[in-house]
Image: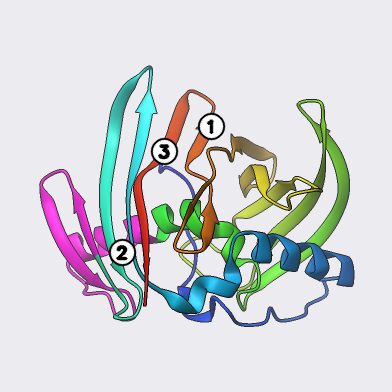
Amino acid sequence: MKTICALFSLAALLATAKVTAADDASARQLADAVWKAAGAANWPEVKTIDFTFAVEKEGKTVASVEHHWDVAAWTDRVKWKGKDVTVNLMNPAADEDAKTAYARWVNDSYWLLAPLKLKDAGVNLSDEGTKEIDGAKRDVLHLSFGKVGLTPNDQYNLYIDPTTKLVTAWDYMPEPGKSMRATWTGYEKSGGLTLATDHQMGPARIRILNLKVTTK
């Protein structure tokens, strides 16, 4: 199984979400609070983001992908399995290595920055009220997408701490009747952003290592 999800270009990262039938005022208000808690006000100052996306199972690392993302230049240097590819995020090349590097950026950066992408164009939001998760009350924000990204049919439920407005878990729903939950923990602050670096999803642990956000 691909290690989850795809997203769309970050070109609209600070854009106002389009209002659709799935949107409502409370959902937009909740999304705005989560967006701000993640440090969205500091995003315009971000220059580069370095991180390693690692997947562990039974205590062993089964995948490790290094990223050096030049946000201003719209490039990402991706290293995995002996490959070293710099991909143009606005216009990825068509060869297999470039397509793989772009798909890695799509997947891995969404695990890193999903809370900052709630106001992107093409995101449909719905306030699903509150739910108790592991003994704690959480606000629930449902995400679906328009015709954007590599897998536009994906949907998510984000579980949000009502006090901090940080995401504590999500349900990933690639198709009706199928749902996988992952935790969002290990928050770190770098370059003005507040980002989760540790996720447990079934037997897999997904970690963001060596996180470094540099600013202009």
Q: What residue lies at 84% left-to-right and 58% top-to-bottom? A: 127
User: Which residue is the site of mark 1?
Assistant: 201
Q: What residue type is labelled 3?
A: Arg
Q: Distance between the residues labelled 2 and 1?
A: 23 Å
Q: Residue 90 appears at what percent x and percent y?
A: 34, 80
Position above or below: 73 against 49: below
Quarter of the picture holding the N terminus: top left
Q: In this view, does 40 lie above or below 166?
A: below
Residue bearing mark 3? 207
Q: Residue at x 33, y 52 (%)?
A: 51
Judged by depth in the image, the label closer to the viewer, 3 or 1, is 3
Start and end of the magenta stretch?
77-105
- Please state which of the two labelled residues, at mark 3 or mark 2, is closer to the viewer: 3
Q: Element type at marker 3? A: strand
Circle 1 crowding by C-alpha within 10 Å: few under 14, some 14–19, many from 20 = some
- Residue drawn at point x = 54 percent, y = 44 percent: 187
Q: Nearer the viewer, residue 197 or 95?
A: 197
Q: How far apart are marks 3 and 2 (CA)?
A: 19 Å
Query: Which secondary structure lies at badge 1?
Result: strand
Residue denoted by label 2: 102
Query: Mark 3 Cα within 10 Å, few/some/many (few <14, many 20+)?
Result: many
Q: State the SS at label 2.
A: helix
Query: Is 100 contained in the magenta span?
Result: yes
Q: Position of residue 77 (x, y in %)?
A: 21, 63
Most foreground residue, 36 or 89: 36
Q: Do the residues labelled 2 and 1 touch (CB within 8 Å)?
A: no
Q: Where is residue 6 in the image (x, y as percent from the top left)?
A: 47, 58
> Upstream in the sequence, badge 3 or badge 2?
2
Give the residue type that dot 2 points to: Tyr
